[in-house]
Amino acid sequence: MKYRIIKYGLLTIIGFFAIYQISPVKFGDYCTGLGPLILFARLGNLFLLVFLVFLAIDLILKIKHKIKFDYIPCIFLGVFIIISFLLFRIKIDEKFWTKTVLTGRVMLGEDLFSAEQLILYENKTFFIKQQHPIGICIYQGKYFIQQDTLVLKRKKLPEPIDKLFCTKYLINQTDSFLIPIEKEYGIINFSECNKGLLEIAN
């Protein structure tokens, strides 16, 4: 019984942490890039090695002691491969379980926009997406709409994002603008918008 607990426990823990590296469901701020992929590869190899070790032990127990072969680790391996395959087909910087209602960029000049994006989702959460040469950093939180004001529920955004985005914006749906309450910040143009922002509050 202890042997099975150790076997299932190790496969579950290693498999979970490997899959978490490529999962789009993450808590708090995070960055993607080569680091998580390398860690996934290492943990995936460790998962396979542990599986092969337990497979060899189970085969020896079956041959020498006539103990019934345990197929459950094979199911673990199959589930691990299927989940990993599906997750590699999903963009890690998007929320596939909810709809995007707004995508906007800060206007730095008349025709110039920042590379960072503000994305609002239907489930009242937001992403600020910062593109890097080797990956993407995601800063996330919740938002709410109070009358005609969008409020991002973050006490402080990390540098250098805090130089581009503030936490309160007046909604100008006619011109597709989010106008910052604090004047030193730039206007956000949300030309990509699936529905009226004020509708989300209802």
Image (spheres, grey):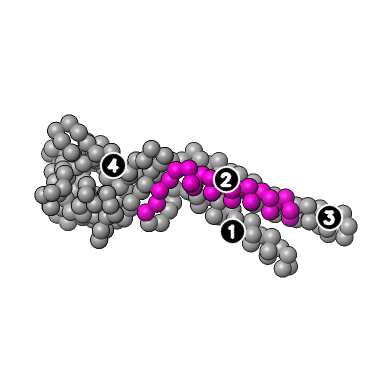
Residue 87, x across and y down, in percent: 50, 43
SS category of the residue bearing label 3: helix
In terms of image quadrants, where is residue 155?
bottom left
| Residue matched to label 3 | 60
The numbered mark, 4 or 2, whose residue comes first in the sequence reads 2
Q: Are marks 4 and 2 in contact (CB under 8 Å)?
A: no
| Residue matched to label 4 | 116
In terms of image quadrants, where is residue 188?
top left
Q: State which mark lies toward you, 4 or 1.
A: 4
**Residues packed near mark 1 inside 10 Å, few (<14), some (14 to 19) or many (20 plus):** few
Query: On the picture, is 153 further left or further right than 12?
Result: left
Magenta residues span: 29-54
The answer to if 93 sits in the magenta stretch is no
Camera sees residue 34 = yes
The amino acid at mark 4 is Glu
The numbered mark, 3 or 1, whose residue comes first in the sequence reads 1
